[in-house]
Image (cartoon, rainbow, N blue to C red):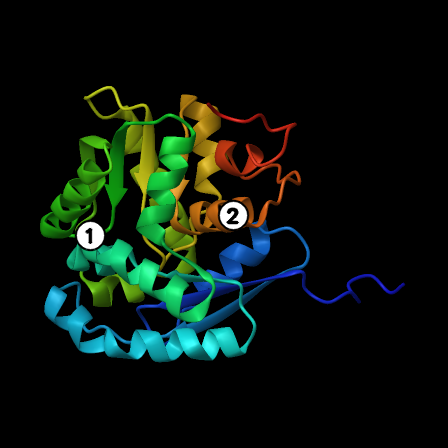
């Protein structure tokens, strides 16, 4: 058989808050096991505000329908600021509606991060972001509803336009810098969350975990972990951090 000639065994759909995003597929195809296909669609929020999210939200169900037509088995509504703007209760209601209406499992970056932290037994975290204080405060409040305390926040405060313009090399460097600063911050965190999708950041988890001995949670690794776990996948994903390694028996299951 020709290598790679078998069809995908799992199709994972993403609805991005932006019409054009390159990091979703780039990051996921680096870390996902062979046979995972990523299918994307995008809305277009103008800013990290509830008003901007509300304006675009009616398109969400339409895009979910399009993804389901492409035979995705799980849909992720991406964008941490988007989830923060809606609030956790509304986000969870939206996910339940998707599941009941379309017959596929549904998730968000924030809910995947929460599930990942709880899976590894982490309830005190440091936050490293590229967002302004009001977004960071919203993230802390959202996490607190899930019993996760933000004990330190390190941020390079940037606008949505500035984050969109962040080049790849600087984004990769910034992920490591923010992670190191967050894990070194006072407050005795037990792990770090580096949220956001508009940067290349998956490499930061294994590097920072080796340096600090604490788990690091990022959008796409957490989303992939949650999706594969939901599918019952227990293969080995080595080299991308403690969370993805925990899928397999060799990686060890957290309690």
Q: Residue at x 22, y 64 (%)?
A: 160
Label 2: how many Cα within 10 Å (few below 14, some 14–19, many 20+) = few
Label 1 to label 2: alpha-carbon separation: 21 Å
| Residue that sits furthest to the front in the current view | 100
- Whether 187 is drawn above or below 220: the answer is above
Q: Residue at x 59, y 52 (%)?
A: 32
Mark number displayed over residue 89: 1
Q: Secondary structure at mark 2?
A: helix
Q: Is residue 86 left or right of residue 200?
A: left
Residue 135 is at least partly visible in this image: yes
Q: Give how far across and how far down residue 28 sits, in percent.
A: 53, 56
Mark number displayed over residue 50: none
Q: Secondary structure at mark 1?
A: helix
- Looking at the rendered image, the quarter that the N terminus falls into is bottom right
Q: Disc 2 marks which residue?
A: 230
- Number of on-image labels: 2
Label 1: how many Cα within 10 Å (few below 14, some 14–19, many 20+) = few
Choose the circle earlier in sequence order: 1 or 2: 1
Residue 165 is at least partly visible in this image: no
Q: Residue at x 46, y 71 (%)?
A: 40
Q: Quadrant of residue 185?
A: top left
Q: Is residue 131 left or right of residue 236?
A: left
Do the CB atoms of the residues marked 1 and 2 lie less than 8 Å apart? no
């Amino acid at each position: 058989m020709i290598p790679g000639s078998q069809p995908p065994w799992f199709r994972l759909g993403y609805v991005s808050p932006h019409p054009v995003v390159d990091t979703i597929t780039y990051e996921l195809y680096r870390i996902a096991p062979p046979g995972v296909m990523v299918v994307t669609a995008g809305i277009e929020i103008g800013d990290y505000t509830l008003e901007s999210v509300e304006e675009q939200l009616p398109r969400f169900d339409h895009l979910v329908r399009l993804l389901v037509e492409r035979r995705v088995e799980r849909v992720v509504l991406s964008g941490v600021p988007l989830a923060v703007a809606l609030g956790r209760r509304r986000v969870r209601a939206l996910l339940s509606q998707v599941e009941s209406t379309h017959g596929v499992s549904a998730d968000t970056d924030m809910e995947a991060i929460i599930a990942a932290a709880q899976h590894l037994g982490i309830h005190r975290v440091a936050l490293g972001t590229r967002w302004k204080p009001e977004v960071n405060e919203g993230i802390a409040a959202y996490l607190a509803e899930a019993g996760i305390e933000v004990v330190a926040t390190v941020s390079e405060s940037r606008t949505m336009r500035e984050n969109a313009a962040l080049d790849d090399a600087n984004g990769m460097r910034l992920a490591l810098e923010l992670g190191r600063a967050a894990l070194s911050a006072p407050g005795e965190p037990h792990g770090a969350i580096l949220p956001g999708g508009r940067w290349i950041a998956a490499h930061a988890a294994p590097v920072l975990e080796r340096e600090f001995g604490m788990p690091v949670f990022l959008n796409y690794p957490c989303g992939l972990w949650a999706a594969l776990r939901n599918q019952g996948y227990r293969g080995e994903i080595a080299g991308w951090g403690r969370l993805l390694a925990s899928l397999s028996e060799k990686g060890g299951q957290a309690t």
